[in-house]
Image (tube, rainbow, N blue to C red):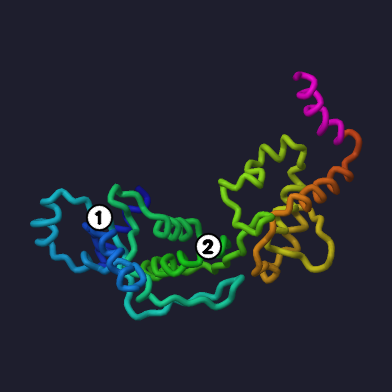
Amino acid sequence: MIFKKYYDELLEKDLAYKCYCTAEELEAEREAQIARSEMPRYSGKCSHLSKKEEEDKLIAEGREPSIRFRVPKGEIIKFDDMVKGDISFETDGIGDFVIVKKDGTPTYNFAVAVDDHLMKMTHVLRGEDHISNTPKQIMIFHAFGWDVPLFGHMTLIVNENRKKLSKRDESIIQFIEQYKNLGYLPEALFNFIALLGWSPVGEEELFTKEQFIDIFDVNRLSKSPALFDMHKLKWVNNQYVKALDLDQVVALTLPHLQKRQAR
């Protein structure tokens, strides 16, 4: 597996360790911390086990270990977010986090950091709900001595009730194919989505993909939630449909007419 060489390296350098705590033990620890009005995080119970303790007790009991990253104590993780500016986290508030599950599966924060490095990613743009993941990924980059990419956390997209969009949101059409079947043009949908959370200079709102690439400026990313406005999408699509010539209109409408006739 591609990730094994990387977590083995962290184990060898003592930048990670095996954790034998059960789900029940972790839950009991979490509940006790909440009862004391503390922020829940792993206590580090398995962070300094000797080989003898592992072999005599935990392995003998048949426990399978996860692997935790050893978070450095007393440090501040800072990064200049391309959208939100300076952001910092205290490592003492994070706790040693799992990078490999008991079944050998790498967790998101570990896998994405390794993937981003291997794919030579220089910029990471994603939703603001990932901000709390960023210090964990930065620590992994630092542990390997890798260059840290630039991070930008964009505003979330909300529905007309100003609620975050989700897969369970029945007020929004979910699948691209559904938009196609309803007659929305790919260019119109691309144009509409490109304007969610980003705005160009001036009043113009209709751009080709090539024009978007030309005029895109990360400094124009919005810090306010982006509204998925179906009325706006219909207007954008209408503009694109009006610009079609007759042959294009025929090619676009004929499959819908044939489908209707077949009924």
Determine whether 194 is above or below 187 in the image.
below
230, 151: nearer the viewer: 230
Residue in the picture at 41% in, 67% down:
136
Q: Where is residue 195 in the image (x, y as percent from the top left)?
A: 72, 58
| Residue 152 position by quadrant | bottom right
Report the mark closest to the observer, 1 or 2.
1
Q: Which of 118 and 59 is in front in this view?
A: 59
**102 with respect to 196 (left or right):** left
Please rate how many residues cluster around mark 2, counting C-alpha atoms within 10 Å: few if below 14, some from 14 to 19, many from 20: few
Mark 1 → mark 2, Cα distance in angstroms: 28 Å
The answer to whether 251 is drawn above or below residue 263 in the figure is below
Residue at 78 percent of width and 27 percent of height: 255
Q: Position of residue 16 (x, y in %)?
A: 28, 64
Image quarter for residue 33?
bottom left
Q: Circle 1 sits on which residue?
A: 24
Residue type for callout 2: Asp
* Image spot of residue 130 (x, y percent): 50, 62
Q: Give the range drawn in magenta.
A: 248-263
Query: Is the C terminus in the top left, top right, bottom left or bottom right quadrant?
Result: top right
Residue drawn at (10%, 51%), measured in percent from left and top? 60
Q: Which of 20 and 164 is in front in this view?
A: 164
SS at circle 2: helix
Side of 20 where 160 appears, left or right? right
- Which residue lies most toward the front here? 35
Q: Main secondary structure of the magenta part?
A: helix
Measuring from the top left, give residue 238's x and y in whole percent. 84, 46
As for residue 254 lying within the magenta part, the answer is yes
Residue 129 is marked as: 2
Which residue type carries mark 1?
A: Glu
Question: Can you tell which mark lies on residue 239?
Answer: none
